[in-house]
Amino acid sequence: RTVDLFVPEAIFPRGIKSAKRELEVLASNDLNGPLGWGNTNTRPQDFKVALDVAFRNQRPVKFFSYGGDENLPAVGLEELMRRNIQRFLKTGRYIPAFAIAA
């Protein structure tokens, strides 16, 4: 049996740095046209990288919300914690409460 641990400080740091560098390079050349930075989160810190790159390269920014019936319903913290424990019991995957509540 395998148990996966969620370590917030170690979430793909090289991949994120690499994506940031690539976005910076692409944004610095107007010939590349519109660029996208996909993220499922909505906290400002989660899209700060893209906003900083756009600002430095004087590029416009548009926010697109994935809409329609596919939007995830809002659920409370208690429900998220319950789901987290259920997922842990079923799969061994656990996310610390402080990471969910952040």
Image: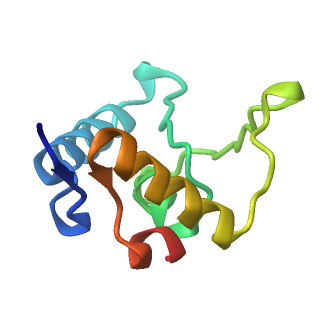
Residue 77 visible in this rendered orientation of the protein:
yes
**Colour mode of the rendering:** rainbow
Position of residue 64 relative to residue 7, above or below, is above
Residue 63, image quadrant: top right
Position of residue 82 relative to residue 50, above or below, is below
Residue 66 position, x and y percent, is 74, 32
Quarter containing the N terminus: top left
Residue 29, image quadrant: top left
For the image, the number of numbered tags is 0
Q: Is residue 76 left or right of residue 59?
A: right
Please state which of residues 12 and 57 is positioned toward the viewer in this rendering: 12
Position of residue 36 relative to residue 77, above or below, is above
Residue 100 position, x and y percent, is 48, 68
Residue 45 position, x and y percent, is 47, 68
Please state which of residues 101 and 91 is positioned toward the viewer in this rendering: 91
Residue 60 position, x and y percent, is 63, 45
Residue 51 visible in this rendered orientation of the protein:
no
Give the residue drawn at x 35%, y 70%: 96
Please state which of residues 32 and 48 is positioned toward the viewer in this rendering: 48
Q: Is residue 96 left or right of residue 81?
A: left
Give the residue drawn at x 75%, y 41%: 72
Please state which of residues 57 and 43 is positioned toward the viewer in this rendering: 43
Q: Is residue 36 left or right of residue 16?
A: right
Q: Residue furthest right?
A: 68
Give the residue drawn at x 88%, y 27%: 68
Give the residue drawn at x 44%, y 29%: 30
